[in-house]
Image: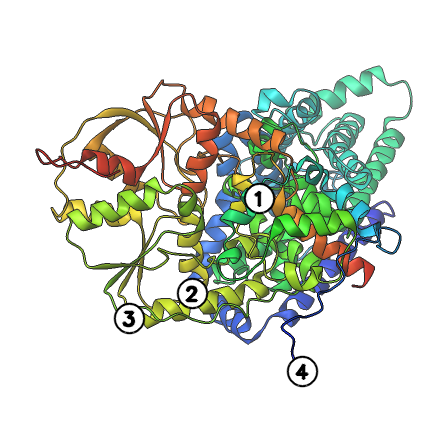
Amino acid sequence: MTFNLFVLPFSLGFIFLFFTMIMKNRSWIHEMDVEDKRKFKSGLRSPRIFFALREIFFESLLHRKMFRRNPMLGYMHMSFAFGWFLLILFGNMESRIYSGFWINPPYYPIFLKFFIHDKHVLPFEIFTVPGFFRFSMDLLLLFVLSGLFLAILKRSRSHWFGLKKTSQLQFSDKVTMTCLWLIFPLRLLAESFTAGAYGYGGGFITQHLGNVLAFLWPLNDKDVAYACWWMYSLSLGIFFVMLPYSRYMHIPTELILIFYRNFGIQTRKGSGFFSEIELLSCSRCGVCIDVCQLNTAAGIQDIQAVYFLQSIRHKQVMNNIVNRCLVCGRCQEVCPVGIHTDYQRLFHREVFRKSQAQDFSFLNGESTRKAEVIYFAGCMSHLTPTIPEAMQQILDTAKIDYLYLDKDHTVCCGRPLMLAGKPVQAEMLIAQNKKTILDSEAVLLVTSCPICYRVFREDYKLDIRILHHTQYLLELIKKGKIPLQAYFRKVAYHDPCDLGRGSGVYNDPRELLLKIADPVKVRNEGKDSLCCGGSLGLINAGTEEKDRITKEALENYLEAKPEILLTACPLCKKTFAKHSPVEVMDVAELVMEAIPKKAGEVMSC
Amino acid sequence: MKSFGYNITEDRQIDFDANDRNVTVFINEIEPSILLCMGCGSCTATCTTGHFTDFNIRKIHTLIQRGELKHLKKEIMKCMLCGKCQLVCPRGVNLRNLILSIHTALEKSGL
């Protein structure tokens, strides 16, 4: 007996899901441009496919990133993903050995215990250790059920899993989740009743549970077992049909995402299909909610990446959701799937502001003198004049021939416009600045502002070296160009968003600090650093909310009671200085302070 | 025509009956912090664009409150959104969103 009517719900659901995924993937491949298609084709024939498989094993099955975040959370995800995967793998091996055929209908391994209940299984087990599969299938089922227990627990006790707040689910998610949760208990019941009714064929759990059930149940166990098989098949079928419309779409999509990402396909401006893949890969795990400072400090709980991506998926993108975000990149950093939430946010800001024209015709290229090194302070540095002043004095001390490009007036670098969703309009400013930079024939561009630094590197496509002043100062110190007399004051260093997470500059400022100061340990440092609250990415939030973010960050950085709060961004300095009880300084200012003053010389600072 | 050294200046009468304050109401609703403005002009003094042109956010603010929208579009197109104005504002007016809201308002009213 290899067919029964009850396999239909599962089979139809499976076929539906299979073809939906094929169609989706076909349309994504169809949407690729020439460049992406080339990457896709060469990727399929390169060893990168093995890297992708490795990533799938560690991230999609074992959930390594989740484990790092919280062992309970990691175990819950692993037991579902890896447990279910092993269940399918072992089930397929088991069914092939029992049936003696290498090709089975897809439902056969799933409902194997129903089909072989009337056969005595022992003769089929001569190829393996007797009872091996019965034992391991029960063990794996137990593994998955333990994860299910934790999943149910997580809905009400999310703090046990390291999540202060778990995501709010939609109706379709709830239905699909219920089906998913029912699958495994129903399988347990169906197998137990079957084993109980026939008296053999079960493993160490299903057989014993089956015997107890057969003893307790006054009705015909075979009929109850049959009903359980129907319900098991139905829950699987409904789960598969609902899957593309719920958050569980991340299960198949994430695999595709990992392959594409390993082939080198990236989120780019206007790259529609890849952002759709990223969008569908969001599992709504809610990890991004806890790290969002708008949530922890300002109590805003409806705009986090998980809800934002959900709103795009349902095509209900609200102005409020898109614009209320610091674009600090903290959610992107912790996202277990690696979704570029910041890029997604900026794409959608663009939709709102596409037709809003800008006019910068009043900028008509100024001629500059030629210099090897140019220093660009940036708009924000002009509001904190001590930073460019310190830089000028240091560069003079080091006897560098440099040109202070924006001494009299700055042209904005363009990133603020990009953050507001106007990358096309920002191109005008970029072209303007690029022309001035190229005219100077410089080989090195130093900037004091991480916002400018990031956009210079990412969007200007300049063929010259670009350094943030922390990097340049370190280089000068290493070359022995700046005489230093260390004071070793106790400082706490804050990584600005655009310098740290945005550009990956973490070590240079720290190396520099070790030479002149005594850095204290900070709770949130490096990739985990907090936004100062002054981010230009946050478009519609009041002063009160921003102040709360600033105060929360200050609390964190001043925990170890440093003498100075040190940052490397004029905007952060200005924002922190508003509320900080201790002095807020830029790295450049501290370096300036550490230069020994000659006797009788008065520093004009 | 013979020049006598005089010219005719534009009428500076503010006609509140003729002015369209719908846009004003819309903007005040999206960005209510605009009502906190005391007109100190710090924003205008620090403005990046202000170095190059006579772009004047304080003036724009006044024009909006009066409902005088004639030259508004041409003016706000010059803003680079760098955010310096916002940082120096002693009243905490969210000036970047104000400029973006004006863009939206003008777009919606077809100006």
Amino acid type, label 4: Lys
Q: Look at 74% across and 41% down and name the residue there.
A: A116
Chain of the residue displaying label 1: B
Chain of the residue displaying label 4: B
Secondary element type, mark 2: helix
Quote the CA–CA distance across marks 3 and 4: 54 Å
Find residue A215 and report its horizontal and vertical position in percent: 81, 16
Query: Is residue A605 shown left or right of residue A598?
Result: right
Q: In this rendering, which labeled residue sits more in front, label 1 or label 2? A: 1
Counting residues from the start of the chain, the first of labels 4 and 1 encountered is 4
Quote the CA–CA distance across marks 2 and 4: 47 Å
Amino acid type, label 2: Asn
Find residue A135 and report its horizontal and vertical position in percent: 59, 30
Q: Which residue is mark 3?
A: A441
Chain of the residue displaying label 2: A
Q: Look at 35% across and 46% down and name the residue there.
A: A505
Amino acid type, label 3: Glu
Chain of the residue displaying label 3: A
Q: Which residue is mark 4?
A: B2
A133, above or below A476, in the image: above
Task: List the single residue furthest toward the left.
Answer: A599
Q: In this rendering, which labeled residue sits more in front, label 3 or label 4? A: 4
Q: Are marks 2 and 4 in contact (CB under 8 Å)?
A: no
Task: List the single residue furthest toward the right.
Answer: A219
Q: Which residue is mark 1?
A: B41
Query: Is residue A530 shown left or right of residue A586?
Result: right
